[in-house]
Image (cartoon, helix red, strand yellow):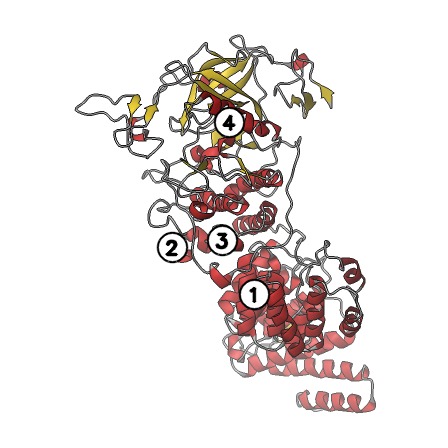
């Protein structure tokens, strides 16, 4: 990095722009327009406001003393109920982290998974309002919330006065006008927007190369000493430095022109673009709001969640997240309006909220990291769904069956339900936890939309340890409980656990040896106990595993890993109904994880719910071809539903580079002839299976065994007189045999004699020769 060469600036050049003045290096700076410098055009965005002007939004939520809440001038929906409330969701996933410090990345919206349309940068000079005025319908008393400044009898309402109900003074007139020099440094150009704390202004910083800045008022108490204390107390905001958070440069005071009382202002960077509220404001021909695509909305959340996590890492709470307070400029996102930010332990400062976005516990418990994440969930819902979030659904989300996008993207719905759970302990444990699950959901959403897989390694689960239900000799039989216990993914070991090193050495050890090793271990940590449970399940000691899990329920209540192993034990014990219930809880808790959906799919298959099983198998396979068990499972279910073409299509989608491509093709041969009655087969099924078998490179024994199965199916089809089985000696053939009983019997004889030559024992050889003689058609010789 190099120092910025502009006079008076102490910043450094990062990614081609100064991190303080926001301008390009002096050698390539644009010529100032109207006496000011042109700001950098790739670092931020602009907010929306009640006036629709660009610039920094004012606070539009309610101010309340301490942890108590009150009505808001802007209402949205909050809270939710549904399957994830109560016991349906495990409490928080483990692991928290947040991104900190500045980053030089640009244009990475969507994590490379979704294309987000860029938003053009807006010249700050064009954002200044020509007639700064607050609409009468948006004028409310800041103390009691009653309407003020309303017109009567054809006369316009007063922009300044006193509330008729409580007597509190109000003013909707700008306190600063063009030409004012706030703090003897910032020359005001005009108003950008109006919010809950008054007007937001555009200004030039005369001390730093005329860079554009925004002035936003602090809470006006009318007490100069209190204002000075408030300014001093909030200077910590200037230390907040994150690429997705608006930069606070300074705090200044300027006298109110009416009273002479000093008013405090936050000085922050100007960002020019559009708020998420504005991007969501597109309407169709009938005037209805057009919901934002789910992938685009998730991309925005993935960009701002690390910013919230960064604040939480500094023991700061954002408190008032909503679409108004997020700006997209070009290909970057910016979290603006830090007026509501407060420290974790602050029980005295006024609390800001916007009803409909804020968590329900704010009135009694105050804000928390969990309540910040709640607002992200509500924002996602508002961006992607048209629903009455200020009325009927103010404290819940619409039902799954009432919202097509929820039905299409069930994992997305589960993310929203968990993020907005009424119980804070059942929400995401951290911003990073929510990022991980949203990223998984985004992969699934985009794969559903365009059919392209988007694989990724999980940080919470191992890959599937074995491919289950793929044995060509038993396919399409469903997998057994013991097979599943040894094959399904398992939770990753928490590396922070004191016994993590010990557990790493026993990763591939036989279960009995694992139990002996862990019983002698000096530490009985949570991870040790979970690994013991897994070993017991794999050994078939289900009673011991159940006893251990019951104890863990007391020491680690609500831990999703305990729920996972309960489901695994239920599968191993042949109880798919109980397993499905446990894995549903895991899926609700971790909707972005493929492992939960895979386990739920096989549980539903074993209990006979084929449609549900197919849905989850398909979600997993479409998103990530690394889960080969999902392909074989989906093919089994499709075949059981008599959809042979769909089963074959799934098996053909197993990549040629996969170690299970051959088993998939062998399964496809079986699928081509698998049927309850010969009448269900068609000539194309038999010919297709024949073509597959002839194209494979197999050992002679396997080839002849498969040939026998195929020829027997073809012969049964001919004997049943199925449509198309004319018994003609010309036309399509199966393994070189015409579709006549005579030719097919000759083919069977050849295959049996070939197997006899490969037999290991004389007894086997004799039995195969006898079988060959039995199927041979009658001849003169």
Judging by the rendered image, the residue that carries numbered circle 1 is 583
Of the two numbered discs 3 and 2 on the same chain, state the one appearing first in sequence: 2
Of the two numbered discs 4 and 1 on the same chain, state the one appearing first in sequence: 4
CB contact under 8 Å: marks 3 and 2: no
Of tags 4 and 3, the one toward the viewer is: 4
Judging by the rendered image, the residue that carries numbered circle 2 is 402
Of tags 1 and 2, the one toward the viewer is: 1
Q: Where is residue 69, by image quadrant? A: top left
Q: Residue at x 61, y 76 (%)?
A: 477
CB contact under 8 Å: marks 2 and 4: no
Residue 37 % position (x, y): 57, 13
Judging by the rendered image, the residue that carries numbered circle 3 is 409
Vertical order, 347 against 42 (above or below): below
Judging by the rendered image, the residue that carries numbered circle 4 is 230
Give how far apart the Cα atoms at labels 2 and 4 are: 47 Å
| Pointer 1 local density, CA inside 10 Å: few below 14, some 14–19, many at least 20 | many
Of the two numbered discs 4 and 3 on the same chain, state the one appearing first in sequence: 4
Secondary structure, mark 4, is: helix
Residue 587 % position (x, y): 55, 60
Give how far apart the Cα atoms at labels 3 and 2 are: 13 Å
Of the two numbered discs 3 and 1 on the same chain, state the one appearing first in sequence: 3
Q: Where is residue 331, by image quadrant? A: top right
Residue 578 % position (x, y): 54, 73
Instruction: Between residue 338 and residue 228, name the one nearer to us.
Output: 228
């Amino acid at each position: 990095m190099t120092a910025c060469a502009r006079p008076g600036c102490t910043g450094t050049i990062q990614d081609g722009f100064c991190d303080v003045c926001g301008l390009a290096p002096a050698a390539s700076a644009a010529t100032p327009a109207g006496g000011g410098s042109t700001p950098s055009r790739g670092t931020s965005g602009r907010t929306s406001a009640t006036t629709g002007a660009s610039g920094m939004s004012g606070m539009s939520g309610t101010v309340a003393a301490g942890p108590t809440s009150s009505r808001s001038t802007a209402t949205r929906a909050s809270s939710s109920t549904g399957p994830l409330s109560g016991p349906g969701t495990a409490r928080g996933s483990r692991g928290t982290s947040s991104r900190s410090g500045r980053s030089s990345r640009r244009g990475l919206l969507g994590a490379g998974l979704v294309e987000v349309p860029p938003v053009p940068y807006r010249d700050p000079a064009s954002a200044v309002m020509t007639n700064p005025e607050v609409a009468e319908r948006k004028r409310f008393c800041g103390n009691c919330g009653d309407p003020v400044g309303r017109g009567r009898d054809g006369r316009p309402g007063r922009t300044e006065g006193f509330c008729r109900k409580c007597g509190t003074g109000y003013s909707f007139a700008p306190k600063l006008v063009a030409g004012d020099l706030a703090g003897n440094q910032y020359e005001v150009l005009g108003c950008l927007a109006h919010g809950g704390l008054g007007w937001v202004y555009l200004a030039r910083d005369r001390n730093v190369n005329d860079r554009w800045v925004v002035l936003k008022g602090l809470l006006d108490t009318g007490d100069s000493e209190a204002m000075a204390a408030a300014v001093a107390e909030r200077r910590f905001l200037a230390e907040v430095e994150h690429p997705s958070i608006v930069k606070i440069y300074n705090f200044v005071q300027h006298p109110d022109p009416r009273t002479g009382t000093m008013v405090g202002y936050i000085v922050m960077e100007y960002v020019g673009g559009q708020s998420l509220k504005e991007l969501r404001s597109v309407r169709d021909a009938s005037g209805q709001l057009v919901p934002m695509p789910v992938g685009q909305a998730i991309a925005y959340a993935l960009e701002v969640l690390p910013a919230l996590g960064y604040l939480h890492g500094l023991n700061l709470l954002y408190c008032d997240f909503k679409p108004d307070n997020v700006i997209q400029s070009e290909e970057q996102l910016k979290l603006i309006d830090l007026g509501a930010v407060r420290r974790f332990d602050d029980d005295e400062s006024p609390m800001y909220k916007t009803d409909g976005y804020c968590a329900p516990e704010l009135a009694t418990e105050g804000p928390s990291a969990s309540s910040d994440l709640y607002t992200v969930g509500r924002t996602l819902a508002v961006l992607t769904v048209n629903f009455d979030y200020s009325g009927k659904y103010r404290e819940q989300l619409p039902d799954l069956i009432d919202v097509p996008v929820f039905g299409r993207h069930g994992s997305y719905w589960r993310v929203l339900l968990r993020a907005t759970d009424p119980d804070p302990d059942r929400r995401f444990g951290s911003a990073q936890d929510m990022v991980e699950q949203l990223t998984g959901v985004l992969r699934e959403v985009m794969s559903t939309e365009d059919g392209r897989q988007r694989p990724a390694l999980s940080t919470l689960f191992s890959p599937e340890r074995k491919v289950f239900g793929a044995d060509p000799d038993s396919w399409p039989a469903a997998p057994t409980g013991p097979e599943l216990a040894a094959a399904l993914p398992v939770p990753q070991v928490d590396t922070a656990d004191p016994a993590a090193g010990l557990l790493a050495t026993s990763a591939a050890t036989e279960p009995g040896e694992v139990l002996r090793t862990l019983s002698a271990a000096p530490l009985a940590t949570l991870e040790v106990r979970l690994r013991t449970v897994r070993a017991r399940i794999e050994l078939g000691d289900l009673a011991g595993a159940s006893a251990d899990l019951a104890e863990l329920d007391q020491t680690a209540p609500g831990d999703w890993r305990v729920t996972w192993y309960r489901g695994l034990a239920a599968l191993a014990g042949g109880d798919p109904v109980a397993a499905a219930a446990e894995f549903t809880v895991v899926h609700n808790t971790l909707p972005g994880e493929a492992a939960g959906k895979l386990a739920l799919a096989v549980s539903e298959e074993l209990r006979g719910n084929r449609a549900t099983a197919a849905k989850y198998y398909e979600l997993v396979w479409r998103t990530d071809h690394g889960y080969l068990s999902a392909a074989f499972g989906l093919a089994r279910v499709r075949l059981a539903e008599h959809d042979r073409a769909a089963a074959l299509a799934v098996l053909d989608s197993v990549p040629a580079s996969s170690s299970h491509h051959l088993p998939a093709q062998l399964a496809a041969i079986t699928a081509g002839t698998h049927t309850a009655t010969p009448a269900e087969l068609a000539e194309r099924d038999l010919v297709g299976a024949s073509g597959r078998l002839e194209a494979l490179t197999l050992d002679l024994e396997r080839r002849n065994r498969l040939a026998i199965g195929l020829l027997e199916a073809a012969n049964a089809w001919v004997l049943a007189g199925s449509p198309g089985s004319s018994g003609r000696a010309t036309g399509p053939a199966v393994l070189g045999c015409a579709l006549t009983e005579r030719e097919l019997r000759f083919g069977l004889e050849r295959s049996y004699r070939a197997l006899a030559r490969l037999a290991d024992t004389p007894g086997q050889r004799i039995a195969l020769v006898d079988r060959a003689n039995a199927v041979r058609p009658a001849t003169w010789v």
